[in-house]
Structure formats: structure tokens, C-alpha cells
Amino acid sequence: MKKVVLIIILLLSAGALIFVYNDDFLYSRQVMKITDIETVREEVSRNSMGLSEEHYTRKITGVVQNGRDKGSTKQMLYEETYSSVVTDRFRVGDKVLIDGTELQLKRDFYVALISCAFVILIFIVGSFKGLLSVVSVIINSVIFYIGLHLYIRGVDLLFLCVAEMIIFSVLSLIFASGVNKKTLSAVISVVISTFVMLALLLIVVKTTSYSGVNFNELSFLNVPAEDIILPELLIGSIGAVMDVAITISSSMSELIDKNAEITEKELNKSAKEIGKDIMGTMSNVLFFTYLCAGLPVFVLALRNGFMFKNYISSNFSLELARFLAGSNGIVMTIPISAFVSIRIMKRGAKK
């Protein structure tokens, strides 16, 4: 059965890739396939720090793929920089979208390629449960999108985030582990941990009034940063909280299944040891995730003469707050998950 499903997924993926590569007719903007690139001018610019960057003017020749001019040859001049921060770097064979004098790489094929590879790999590794996890991600994305529209219509963002966290947890854990006691205990643990973490964050916020946190990266918001940061802290930690909750619940379930006579004291001791093992790794996952989010700006600041200490104090404080909130959520989830799991599963085992 698994081989048949894998063949179907491979055929569907191949069909999807072929369709996406030839979907130029769906675009209202003109699509051009590059056949030749010629460098017209090359120069070097320097900033006040003495750092240099190469700038190029390219003449791009290509064949129009859609619209009234389909099949015709077109030439355009295009400005490109060595870093490609604000410009794309094109190669012969690429398809580009034309918007006036601007060119933009047509990326849908690459997105489809990565998505198909992800689905194939997750099915090979995780079988049908892997496919269910993909479905849960899609459903959660739709729910998140609906939540954004509700916020635009005036619904409180913090309320939406708490509600979505509970919905995300229920759906993700059910898709991952099915409907059983360990899923129930994990869901209850996530809900309790969410409200405990929210209460802790509210206490800290009311006590400190966000003192020490710099909101420079949120300066373009047209709403108070405080209305965004608290929901962001909660959403940013939900994945790690769910991971810890299901890990503890699954471990307790396995121990009780192997030995129904195991005592609560022994279970608590095992949960504590498991918590020690996952606490450090999950905290490091959060730390490096938020570190990577700020890495481009961090490198840019250092290259432009910012002192390391000044950058950390002025720009990294928000990333640090996110990391600490998520880490607190992980630490709190361990004893909560252990307590809930043991009470639910041990009671069933006795019966």
C-alpha cells in the first residue's frame, strides 16, 4: 500500500512541476524566458567605511512566454549588484516577470519543487502520519490567515492568538498522534501552559512596562508595538511547547503501557529526567532560530561600524525577549505535562 501511495505522490508531483513550469498563461504580467545576458557596464562603489560593492548593468535578451507578444524576442537593461540584496541575479534559462522597467524572478517552479520534495521525503520517513502532518500545517496556515482577517475587522489580536494557539495544538497533536489519551493529555498540557505563560508575560509586562526592550524593527507599524509583541511571543513559542508536551505525554504513555504497576513517584522521576534531556536542546532550537532571524541585520550592522555591544543593546533585545518567553514556556510545560499525563493515563491503567 505504501509503495502504491508513493508512486501516486511521485506522479502527482511530476505533474504539478510540469504544470507550474508552463503556467505562464496564468500571469497578468508579461513572462520572459532569458536566452542571453550581456554585461554592458561594470563599476565599483565605496561607502564611508571604505567597503566596496560591484554594480553591473546587464542587457538581457529573452523570449516572451505569454500575452499578445508571445513568441517575440525582447531586450531590456537591468541593474544588478554583487550582493543581490535588493536585486535578483539572473541566469540563462530563468523566467522573469516584467513590470514596466523592473524584472523579478519567477519563483513558483522553485517553490513547487521544494514543496514536492518535502512531501515525498516526509512520506518516505513518516509514512501516512507524515502526510497528516503536512495536512495539519496547511489547515493551520488557513486558520492563521483567517485570524489575520478577523484582526483587520477589529477582533482583539491577543484573544485571536490565544484561541489560535489552542486550535493549532488540538489539530496538530490529533494529526500527529491520533485521538487517544496521550493526545488528550498533551492538548490539556499545552492549554494550561499557554495560560500560565500568558499570565507570567502579563505580570512581567505590567511590572516592567517593556523596559529594556527596543522596538526599532517594529518602527513601521501603525499600531502600538505593545499590541503586537505579546501575541508574537506566544505564537513564537507554541511549536516548542507542543513538542515538549507530546514528548512527555508519549513517554509516560509508553512507560505505563510497559508496566501498569509503575508508581507515580517513578513516573515523576522519569519525566524529570526526560525533561532535563529535552530542555536544553529545545531552548537551543529557539535561541538559534531567533538568532538566525536577526543575523542579516547583525552582519550589516557590524560591516557598517556598529559596535557589538551597541547592536546587542539596541537591536537584539527583542530577539532575546522572544527567546526567554519561549524558554519559559518550555520549562513550565515539562512539569505541567508530567502532572497531567500521569493523572490521566495512570487512572486509566488502574481501571
Image (tube, rainbow, N blue to C red):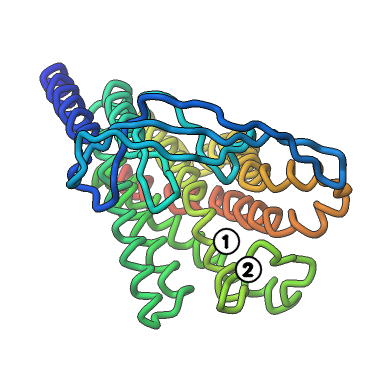
Asked if 311 appears above or below 291 in the picture, the reply is below
Q: Would you say 209 lies left or right of 102 here? A: right
Counting from the top left corner in percent of width and height, residue 72 is at: 24, 35
Asked if 245 appears above or below 130 in the picture, the reply is below
Which residue sits furthest top?
A: 3
- At a point 21% along the width and 43% down the height, the residue shown is 69
Query: SS class of the residue under badge 2?
Result: helix
- At a point 44% along the width and 75% down the height, the residue shown is 159
Q: At label 1, which amino acid type do we have?
A: Leu
Q: Nearer the viewer, residue 280 or 346?
A: 280
Q: Would you say 111 lies left or right of 68 here? A: right
Measured Cα–Cα span from mark 1 to mark 2? 9 Å
The mark nearer the N terminus, 1 or 2, is 2
Counting from the top left corner in percent of width and height, residue 258 is at: 36, 28
Q: At label 2, which amino acid type do we have?
A: Leu
Which residue is label 1 attached to?
233
Give the label, 1 or 2, closer to the camera: 1
Query: SS class of the residue under badge 1?
Result: helix
Q: Nearer the viewer, residue 287 or 308?
A: 308
- At a point 29% along the width and 41% down the height, the residue shown is 31
Asked if 112 appears above or below 179 in the picture, the reply is above
Which residue is label 2 attached to?
201
CB under 8 Å between discs 1 and 2: yes
Give the image quarter of residue 265: top right
From where the camera sits, is residue 177 visible?
no
Numbered marks: total: 2
Q: Which quadrant of the rendered structure holds the N terminus?
A: top left
Question: 10 Å neighbourhood of mark 1: few (<14), some, or many (≥20)?
Answer: many
Q: Would you say 275 lies left or right of 92 here? A: right
